[in-house]
Structure formats: structure tokens, C-alpha cells
Image (cartoon, helix red, strand yellow):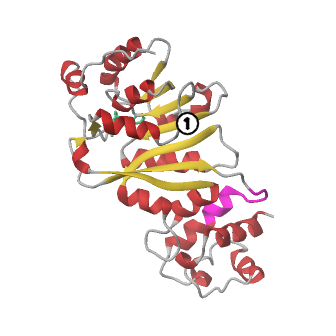
């Protein structure tokens, strides 16, 4: 397929008056080589369906389209719609744009029951809220086949963290229970316009096949209580969770340990005991 000639992203931004909005967490990527590299993280996308949240002026979107994906993009900022419409014209029938708040939407409904890869570069608060939603809930497996998400580096490190350190917490337990998470790429702050204060990193997650009999809500209750008082011993921090101390006893987990010493399997075992 002959690739359409696209104007440079800086020209698109200037022509459509898309000055970055701080309240919408807008930090744009203009380096097309970097964007093409990000589009390779989930693997082969040709002919695959992709959900992109927060396309902005369409930098990552054009990389996904170049990779051959069928893209559905959800963007909150109406100002970006004309630029995205232009991109859609350059790749006829391959880009659907939905305007609105991705936090308030049922993403599966837009993807017509088909499996899809998720790619997104979102502001911190929206990104983590969507991540816990994609990874959480009682329905499993999900319709998404992978998540490729840009986060502040510190958040990315919390998702892939191993027990024993201060980065290990609720996000790590959820991500590593429900999936296989890896840090795919670090992105320097200078790659963004305007540059954010901190470094970023891309996390790639594929969903795990779930063992039966574990309630996501129970696991969430345990990790919230345990890491909510992470300096305390489990016998203190889990007091508020009915049945948790008995479960520790039955599983032979020493109640004088602290949350960050329990690995994901141990948290899951406690949740399973409370779920039955
Ligand atoms: N993908 C573009 C890029 O990499 O250059 C833009 C990234 S910018 C960090 C985040 C984008 O997410 C912005 O375009 C912003 O308007 C959009 N956004 C922020 N909150 C959103 C939400 N709740 N739902 C959908 N889009 C949102």
C-alpha cells in the first residue's frame, strides 16, 4: 500500500490552533520515528483493531494507521477533531473518532465485540484510572488483547515492581495477577511538547488466563488495607478486613510480616480464601 503524504505534526498543530491545554494534560509527541517505534510495541498491527485513547492531534494515531491498524480513537478535546478528520481522510475507512471522556464510556461497545489492542498516552490521573478499570472487575478474560500505555516513569515502575521495595503496591499486585506486565520503553521528557516535569515510560501488558475462584473485589480490599498501612504488620493492617487474619493463619503466612514482603501469589491466596 502506498502511504499517504502527511504534513508535519507541528504544521497540523499550528494550522488548527492546538496550543497544549494543561488542564487536559496535553503533552504532544512530534517525533515520527519515536511514534512508529511505540506502534511496534504491541506487535504486528496490520488488519488488527486498535483502541487509542487521547489521540490529540493524531501523532500516535498516524503511526498506528501506517502500521496497518483499524483505529477507533476517543478524544475529549473538540479542538482536535478537525485535525483527526483530516487524518481519517488520508486513510479512508480506517479511523473512527469518538469525542468524549473515555472514563465515562463502555469501550467494548465501540469495538463491536471484536478483540482489540489498546494504545494510549494519557494524563497521569486518567491513565491510572483507566488502567485499574481495564485490569479490574469480575469479568475475565477481557476483550482487549494488550495494553500499551505511556505513564510517568514512576507509575510505570510501580506497575512492574517486585516485592520488597517501596514501588511495590496495589498497582503491581493487580497488574501481575491479571497479566504479564513489562516496561517496554523509556521516553525522555524532552520528546514531548511542552516537556513534562518528569520522565515517562511505556508499559505493555498482556492478559493472563485467570485461575478461578478469586474475586477482584476481595483482592482489592486486601491490597487497599495492607498497603494503606504499609509500615504496619499484617495483623494490624488487615484487622479491618473480615476473615483476613484467619486466612493468613490457614495459609501459614506470618502475620508479623509487612505488605511489601508478600508476593502476588500470596495476596491471591488470601483473596481466594476470602472469596470461597
Ligand atoms: N496521543 C497524543 C500524543 O501522544 O501526542 C496526545 C497525548 S496528550 C498527553 C493526552 C491526550 O488525551 C490529549 O489530547 C487530551 O485531550 C486527551 N484526554 C485527556 N483526558 C481525556 C479523557 N478523559 N478522555 C479522552 N481523552 C482525554
Residue 197 horizontal/vertical position (percent)? 23, 53
Residue 124 horizontal/vertical position (percent)? 37, 49
Residue 103 visible at all: no
Residue 142 visible at all: yes
For image coordinates 56% across by 42% down, the residue present is 146
For image coordinates 20% across by 18% down, the residue present is 15
Ligand 1 position by quadrant: top left
Q: Is residue 85 above or below residue 37?
A: above
Task: Give the number of callouts.
Answer: 1
Is residue 212 in the magenta section? yes
Q: Is mark 1 on a helix, strand or loop?
A: strand
- Magenta residues? 211-221
For image coordinates 81% across by 64% down, the residue present is 276
Mark 1 crowd level (few <14, some 14–19, many ≥20, 10 Å Cα): many
Task: Describe residue 127's horizontal placement relative to residue 15 as left or right.
Answer: right
Residue denoted by label 1? 117
Task: Describe residue 101's horizontal placement relative to residue 269 as left or right.
Answer: left
Q: Is residue 31 above or below residue 263?
A: above
Q: Is mark 1 within 8 Å of ligand 1?
A: no
Residue 27 in which image quadrant: top left
Residue 23 horizontal/vertical position (percent)? 28, 40
From this viewpoint, which residue is outermost toward the front?
1
Is residue 123 in the magenta section? no
For image coordinates 60% across by 38% down, the residue present is 144
Residue 77 horizontal/vertical position (percent)? 34, 28
Residue 142 or residue 180, whichever sits in front: 180
Task: Describe residue 104's horizontal placement relative to residue 191 as left or right.
Answer: right
Task: Describe residue 262's horizontal placement relative to residue 56 as left or right.
Answer: right
Amino acid at each position: 500500500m502506498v502511504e499517504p503524504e502527511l504534513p508535519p505534526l507541528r504544521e497540523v498543530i499550528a494550522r488548527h490552533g492546538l496550543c497544549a491545554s494543561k488542564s487536559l494534560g496535553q503533552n504532544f509527541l512530534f517525533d515520527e520515528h519515536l511514534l512508529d517505534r511505540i506502534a511496534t510495541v504491541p506487535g504486528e498491527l496490520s488488519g488488527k483493531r486498535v483502541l487509542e485513547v487521547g489521540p490529540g492531534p493524531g501523532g500516535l494515531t498516524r503511526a498506528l494507521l501506517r502500521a496497518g491498524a483499524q483505529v477507533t480513537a476517543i478524544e475529549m478535546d473538540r479542538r482536535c477533531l478537525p485535525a483527526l478528520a483530516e487524518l481519517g481522510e488520508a486513510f479512508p475507512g480506517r479511523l473512527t473518532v469518538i469525542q468524549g471522556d473515555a472514563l465515562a464510556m463502555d469501550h467494548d461497545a465501540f469495538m463491536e465485540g471484536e478483540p482489540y489492542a489498546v494504545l494510549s498516552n494519557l494524563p497521569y490521573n486518567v491513565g491510572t484510572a483507566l488502567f485499574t478499570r481495564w485490569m479490574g472487575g469480575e469479568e475475565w478474560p477481557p476483550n482487549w488483547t494488550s495494553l500499551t500505555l505511556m505513564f510517568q516513569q514512576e507509575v510505570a515502575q510501580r506497575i512492574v515492581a517486585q516485592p520488597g521495595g517501596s514501588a511495590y503496591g496495589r498497582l503491581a499486585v493487580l497488574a501481575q495477577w491479571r497479566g504479564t506486565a513489562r516496561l517496554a520503553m523509556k521516553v525522555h521528557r524532552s520528546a514531548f511538547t511542552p516537556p513534562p516535569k518528569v520522565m515517562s515510560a511505556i508499559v505493555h501488558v498482556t492478559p493472563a488466563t485467570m485461575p478461578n475462584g478469586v474475586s477482584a473485589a476481595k483482592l482489592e480490599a486486601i491490597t487497599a488495607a495492607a498497603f494503606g498501612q504499609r509500615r504496619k504488620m499484617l495483623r494490624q493492617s488487615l484487622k479491618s478486613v473480615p476473615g483476613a487474619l484467619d486466612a493468613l493463619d490457614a495459609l501459614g503466612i506470618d502475620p508479623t510480616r509487612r505488605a511489601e514482603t508478600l508476593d502476588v501469589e500470596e495476596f491471591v491466596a488470601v483473596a481466594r480464601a476470602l472469596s470461597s
